[in-house]
Amino acid sequence: MSKNYAVARVQQYTKASIGKSERHIERKNQNYENMNVDLSQTPRNVHFKSCGDLTYNATLDKMIEEGTVSLRGLKPDAKLFDEMIFDVNTAYFEEHGGYDYACRFYEEVFRFAQKEYGPENILSAVMHADEFNSALTEKLGYPVYHYHLHVVALPVVEKEVRYSKRCKDPELVGKVKEVIHQISHSKKWASQKVTDKDGKSHIIKSYSLLQDRFFEHMRDAGFEDFERGERGSTAQHLSVTEFKVKKETERLENLQVTAKVMEDGIDLLTEQTEEAQKEADKAQKRVDHLVPKMEKIEDLARKYTNDADEVLPQPEVLESAKSYREKKAMPLYRKIIGVLRNLFNKYLDLKRDYESLQLKYDKAVDSANQMKKTIQRLNEEKDSQSGIVAKFYALCRGFGEDVIEGQARDILEKEAEERQRKKLLSKKHDRGAR
């Protein structure tokens, strides 16, 4: 059994950029570039918390208006929203009960997210259960979906606002004037300085500590059989995209094995086809040898199947017609006709056998050609996908995983929006034409 890793990741968004992520998380699009999204399964997605009819931005504006949170001191393009993505290998859930187990697992994860942000600062929490896992489906032989949780929250910290030196009352200078709930991602997720057992100080990234807390919370809640990477390790947990790329890479390897099996099958079929061709050639030679003789026999058969009165000679003068015809001519005639007809029927049987053999040979050749085309297509698909995977990893190494994922998501959603726009314009044009 392979190891299962529990992963928690955080992505940041501005007011301008959160809309694209919202449409993906809340399944507001009609079409998705991600071909794994199966909208027929979307009703199985579970909302542990929702903004209702409001958008994320509208909910934030309402909280600001009510004084629940503050944007004081922030730039217009500041990162205001956090998207936490909690993920475990799909196989983990299939090993423990599938969909029902995933619902219980992520309900507990939602409780952990509430501790991290505060229940009042979470806008949405939805478990996706509608993304098809093709690799595990092929392995297990039944439809399998990848379960993961998206939590959208506001990174709120308590900020003390103190009286400045300009205050008219000198005794108030420096004292706390008010405490506001300020949105600040940098303060919420600031790295921490810790001292090890040897007295040495180290800076630990806040996300590493988040992984620790997430792992400990779920283990304390009774969920086991998954692991968390060691602190300080250079190894990184797989993101959702990396996980899918890894699985597609494994699927490519399986595809290569399948292609090899099909190639072997083609070789065997080619051998059988060659044998069939040899047999067909032998039969053709036999038929070619017999055809001239059969044609003569066929002519004789046609000639001697005519009325006996037209074929047999008249009796001699000294012999009665009745005696000649009944005792000599008719018995010989019937015997000759029987032999000829029997030969002709044998010829027809041989001809049918040859035509059947030729038909089987033609089908075998067609089948071999089709399999060759399939192998060529599979090899082209394999080369194409291998190149895509290699390029993806190269981009991640060069620019960083988060940057590449963000860019890719923006591009794919823009393309999906453009296709939807063209589709709507096309429908409008059709209605106008009618």
Image (cartoon, grey):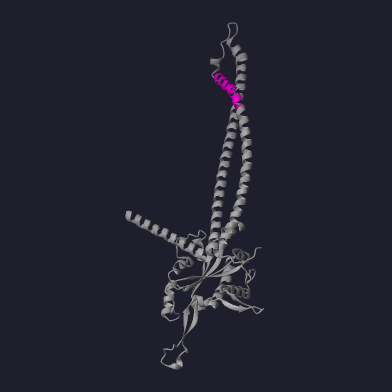
Q: Which image quadrant for residue 65?
A: bottom left
Instruction: Say which residue appears at 60% left-offset and 6% top-offset.
Output: 318
Instruction: Residue at 58% x, 60% y: name it.
Output: 246
Judge left or right: residue 120 versus residue 105: left
Image quadrant of residue 280? top right
The segment highlighted magenta reads: 286-304
Q: Nearer the viewer, residue 157 or 53?
A: 157
**Visible residue check, residue 12:** yes
Q: Nearer the viewer, residue 410 or 330?
A: 410
Majority SS type along the magenta span: helix
Quadrant where the image shows the C terminus: bottom left
| Image spot of residue 29 (x, y percent) | 45, 63
The reply, left or right, for residue 52 in relation to residue 324 is: left
- Residue 187: image x %, image y %? 51, 78
- Whether residue 434 is visible here, answered yes or no, is no
Using the image, determine if residue 368 lies above or below residue 92.
Answer: above
Q: Position of residue 234 (x, y in %)?
A: 61, 68
Q: Is residue 26 magenta?
A: no
288 in the magenta segment: yes
Rendered position, 229 above or below 138: below
**Which residue is pictured at 53% across the width and 62% down the height?**
398
